[in-house]
Every structure is written in C-alpha cells, then in structure tokens.
Image (tube, grey):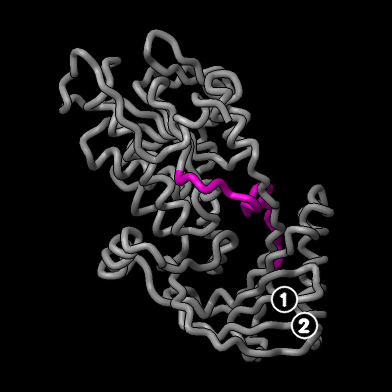
Amino acid sequence: MDDRVRSTLVDRVTRTSETPPDSHAPLDVAVIGAGLSGLACARSLSDAGNRVRVFDKARGPGGRMATRRNGELRFDHGAQYFTVRDPRFRRWVERWHADGLVARWPGTIAVVRKGEISFKDDSIERWVGVPGMSAICGRLASGLEVAYGSRIVHLEHRDNRWRLRTADGTDAGRFDAVVVSAPAPQTAALLAAPAAHLAERAAEVDMAPCWAAMVSFPDTLGLDFDGAFVEDSPLGWISRNNTKPGRPADESWILHATPEWSRQHLELDQDVAAQWLADAFQDAGGRDLPPRRFLTAHRWRFALPINPLSEPCLLDPDLAIAACGDWAGGPRVEGAFLSGCAAAEGIAGLRSTSTRL
C-alpha cells in the first residue's frame, strides 16, 4: 500500500496551513445515501452547524433499515434487530429509548434444522426500532434537507468544489465536501474517476446478496419461537415480526435466504423467489402451514459485507471526500452508525484545518 492510499484510511485526519481559515465557517456537504450510515453522518454534520444535503434514489429514508407496509401489515425486511457494544452508540440508543423510538425485543430465539428445534442459551440484548426499524432513520432525517428519488451518478472535483449530477442529467449542486454512504460496490463505482485510491479500497469488500420473503397468515402458527437461525436450508433466518414491540398483531414472518442461495438465485423472478422461500419455511418448520394471507419478496443485492474493512471510514482530506457504511468498521447496525459518525468527524475536521475554504 503506497503512502497516499495509507494516508486516506483514517477516521480522523488533520492538516496544517500557513493561513488558517475561519474555524467557524460552515461547510456545504453532500451526503449520498439516506441509510443509517449516511444519516448518522448528515445528522452529526448538521448538528455541528454545517449545511448538509442528502441524496437518495429511494422514496424515503432507511436503506436496509427498512420497513415494508402492505395495508395494516408491517415487515422489517432488512435489518432484523441490533445490538449495542460501543459506549458511543449506547448513548444514542439510550436517548432513542427514552423517546420511545426503540425498544428491547425479548423474543425467544431458536436454532431450527429440518423440523428439529433447539433453543439458544441467549443473553443477548436485542433492540428494534418502534414502530418499525425504519423509525430510527426517520428520526435522524428529521429536519435535514433530503432529496429523495435522486440517484447521483457523477462526481467531479473542480476549483476546490464538488459538482454532482443525477441520473437524469440534473445538476445537483456545488459542495465543499462529499460523503458517499452507498454499499461498497456502488461506492467503488461512483468514486472510480474522482478518487480512484478510495474506490480501490471499497472494491476490496465483497457484499453478499439476500432474498427476503414477507409472509402473513390469518392465524398464529403456534411455533415456539419468535426468531430462529436455520440450518441445512435455503433459509438462514426467520422471525415473527409481530412479536416485536409496537407492531400490528397480524401473524407476519420474515424469511431471509442464505447468502449462498441468494447468490445462486439472484436473478429469480420476485414471485418465484417468494414461493421458494415460503416452501423452505414449511420444510424448516417440519409442519404444514395454513393458507397464506400475503406473500412477496425483496432482493437485497448488497446485503451483508463478507470482509469489511477494519477502518471505520475512508477519507481523503485533500479532496474533501469520505465514504462510510457497514462495510467499513463492522457489518452490524452499530458499525454502520459509527462509520457515519467517523466520516462526519473527518469532514468536520476540514473546517478548521484546510486552506481550501
């Protein structure tokens, strides 16, 4: 690894200058991606007095912290729950808990293998957003300027400013700094031209896909667990979504396929994938299931970082650009949040150390 690349792989970088600028001058920052990492970054930068605009191709915030709605039904079809290890993240979770935004999920967790069920000696404290996992990102996005339905496809650094362009050719503005919080392969593609050294690092991360089925039944299934890790099956995880705090009472299940099965069947038709996973659910439970009330599936093309970077974020202070996500620092909800905070800290540091501004 050459010195230039090494110098970018830090979560906090300082630079000196002969003529320091006004350390209180706010930065104009573009954050690409309104998932947890991007919104954690945007929230931190905005709270520090910077002018932040977030861009996301989706219709709302959340990314993989998503909640799917169908009538009265609710499905957390991305992240299922989160745990807390780092005291920095714990402070945020305690604040959210006090506000009723998150709650502990005391669900019974099992291991299922072809109809045989064993229960985990489980002391893990699992948390969920209330009334859905997307509630956390909704709170972080509150008060921020967010351009939904805007897919940024081009970044250009010229005259110490970043210029952004959307997929339909729209000029998305000029900014002092940019933070990219897309999945690693998409980050690598976006940074290939303007910051190839960062793109190369992001490209090192392999992200596995995941097919997720959402299924509801008119009556309870009578299974003795609320979530289960599944072995010897196309499924890797199943959970009864309605046992999480604040959810509707309708019997609703999330079925996550394994990374291997998802890779092999990545281009399946959505309805076919949903049916296959529903059949696998019946096989795993070892019993016939009643007629379904609702069934659909969603493909997460970039769901799980297999080999995340050890650095909490990527940062080039000379270009004033950073990248963050659960693919940097750790493949958990907590890791995504802290990665966004690290990127915000690195970008905020430019305000008092750079001669660009």
User: Which residue is under mark 2?
Assistant: 113
Is 44 placed left or right of 316 in the picture?
A: left
Relative vertical location of residue 232 with respect to residue 324 in this rendering, above or below: below
Magenta includes 5? no
Q: The disc labelled 1 sits on which kind of residue?
A: Val
Is 351 placed left or right of 133 in the picture?
A: left
Position of the N terminus by quadrant: top right
* Residue drawn at 63 percent across, 50 percent down: 307
User: Which residue is under mark 1?
Assistant: 230
Closest to the observer: 174 or 291? 174
* Residue drawn at 44 percent across, 21 percent down: 172
Label 2–label 1 contact, CB within 8 A: yes
Spatial CA span between label 2 and label 1: 6 Å
Q: Which residues are magenta?
A: 295-312
Assign the magenta stretch its main secondary structure.
strand
Relative vertical location of residue 357 with respect to residue 352 in this rendering, above or below: above
